[in-house]
Amino acid sequence: MQNVGQLIGYARVSSVGQDLEQQLLALGQGGCQRIFEEKASGAKRERPELNRLLEHLRAGDVLTVTRLDRLARSTTDLLHIAERLREIGAGLRSLAEPWADTTSPAGRMVLTIFAGIADFERSLIGERTSAGRAAAKAKGVRFGPKPILSVEQLAHARRLIDEGEPVAGVARLLGVHRATLYRALALRVGA
């Protein structure tokens, strides 16, 4: 980082009953001029104080946390946040994990390696998912929502329509929308 900005802290606990005091003390001792506090589960996608902090950061600032798990829900989430910081020109530093300091070349290298590992992991998961789906399809497993109408209901509907009953009336009888019945019977609208 060329220009030196502020050390901005982020402290988070998962529930209202938990205490931020230890994190606030450590961040203050770590030199943070301002600390954003949040009481929200890390699993939540929306963390308003984290969003405010990210909007507040300027080039040269360093987002400081006591531990990375206070900041991110997963490695992927951490990498997204780190990328956003990089775009701003801000750094990231963890007090408990000195290797996670993007203001140093070694810290940037470690995060780059993490990004590669996360990308590799996503690829493996995608490959395993595709292979699993293909194997399941080969065994006759059907994907998607369960059909609304049973085979018997569709046969009954087809018979009624063939006997001259209007599609709208048959759909009402079966408790479905007319379009649903058309799709299920693979009829064209107006047929």
Image (cartoon, helix red, strand yellow):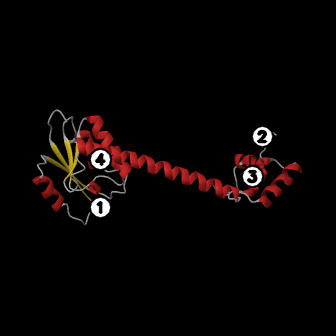
Cα separation between marks 1 and 2 = 53 Å
Quadrant of the drawing holding the C terminus: top right
* SS type, badge 1: loop
Q: Earlier in the sequence, mark 3 or mark 1?
A: 1
* SS type, badge 4: helix
Residue 99 spot, x, y in % from top left? 23, 51
**Residue linked to disc 4:** 110
**Residue linked to disc 2:** 188
Mark 3 against mark 2, which lies toward the viewer? 2
Mark 1: amino acid: Ser
Residue 13 spot, x, y in % from top left? 26, 60
Residue 157 spot, x, y in % from top left? 81, 54
Mark 2: amino acid: Arg
**Residue linked to disc 1:** 14
Q: Earlier in the sequence, mark 4 or mark 1?
A: 1
* SS type, badge 2: loop
**Residue linked to disc 3:** 171
Q: Between residue 9 and residue 162, name the one nearer to us.
A: 9
